[in-house]
Image (spheres, rainbow, N blue to C red):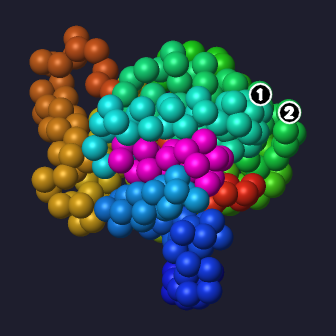
Amino acid sequence: MSLNRFDRAYEGLNHLLGSQNPTTLNALSLIAVFYANIGHSKKAESMFREILAGQKFSLGNLHPDTLWTQNCLGGVLFMKEKSEESVRLVENALEDLQSVPGPEHLDTLWVAHNLAQIYVNISKIKEAVALQEKVVEGYVKELGDDHINTLYMINDLGDCYMREERFGKAHEMFEKAFEGKKRKFGLRSPHTLYTATFLAITMKELGSEKEAEDLYKATLETAIEILGPEHADVCLCSMYLADLYVGQRRFLEARELYQKVYAIRLRLQGPDHKNARHVEQILLEINKRIDFPDHVASQAPMKSRQGLDTPSQMGFRGRGDTVQVLF
């Protein structure tokens, strides 16, 4: 459904039922979710604040709908400014949802997942792992271990383990998510390709560098064909393959990949964006190793680790939506 259709549906409900009616507010929430997911955080924030005020008035502070919106507002604020207020909004929403509708309800579990992602962003990795483990346990119990939502949560648990450098556990989670997505979507799906990249990371960290390189290359080739050469997941896979080459001192091959990523960053984000500057610094270091191999021979291999600095994107969804689309 297009945004224009959402707008027309909301306008009709607003006319028939009034702006404070829960049904009208739920329709407005769908539009706010749309804006949040396409990165219009200022517009989404304004809408979620309006919805939250209306739900507090018509439903009360502790109604699940109200708490859901509080979580969404906290998520938008965190993506914009990473403030303590934004973290508290999501923490408080989770605490209240654990009472009503309960700790194993899918709404509660999704908010717990969002909070885990926030904790990853602020380097509270231990807390993130503990939360995400409970989320996976709840999704397995409620939906089964092969449901697409469960696979989503298993993937993000692998991400949490990877940040703790528990690569064996991370590999186990990514392998489960990869096999499940492969059954559900096939090998050429963006969902499957995304997890394949992280599965290759754990292979490399566990010492299976040849297998990791083969998976990176296969994933990269398919991702370019399916998503196009400038897609974010293509850049992510390229960075990790280049990182593997750097660790093996295959600097010419690494430089070629980083140069492609840098060109994309410059074109899409400009030279002053942090991502472009990050790749530029890596290229400078690689060129030093190529130009002065004797001088740097004793240095430890350089690692970019960019992917580990960027956790899975926190998703926003409408109430009752049991099919995640942000893998």
Q: Nearer the viewer, residue 67 or 124?
A: 67
Q: Whole-percent x and y of residue 248?
A: 40, 26
The quarter of the picture where the N terminus appears is bottom right
Q: Is residue 46 above or below residue 133?
A: below
Residue 270 colored magenta? no
Lateral position of residue 188 relative to residue 280, left or right? right
Res 126 visible = yes
Residue shown at 41% from the left, 34% from the top: 87
Residue shown at 38% from the left, 39% from the top: 86
Gap between marks 2 and 1 measured at Cα: 6 Å
Instruction: Name the quadrant containing residue 202.
Output: top right
State if disc 1 and disc 2 touch (CB < 8 Å): yes
Lateral position of residue 76 relative to residue 150, left or right? left
Q: Nearer the viewer, residue 290 or 203?
A: 203
Tell me the SS state at disc 2.
Answer: helix
Three-letter amino acid code at the position of disc 2: Lys
Three-letter amino acid code at the position of disc 1: Glu
Residue shown at 56% from the left, 87% from the top: 15
Indicate which disc residue 100 carries: none
Instruction: Name the quadrant containing residue 146.
Output: top right
Residue 65 colored magenta? yes
Q: Which stretch did the figure color magenta? A: 59-78
User: Disc 2 marks which residue?
Assistant: 141
Q: Is residue 213 above or below residue 2?
A: above
Q: Is residue 45 above or below residue 95?
A: below
User: Disc 1 marks which residue?
Assistant: 137
Q: Residues within 10 Å of mark 2 (few under 14, many from 20)?
A: few
Q: Whole-percent x and y of residue 82?
A: 31, 38
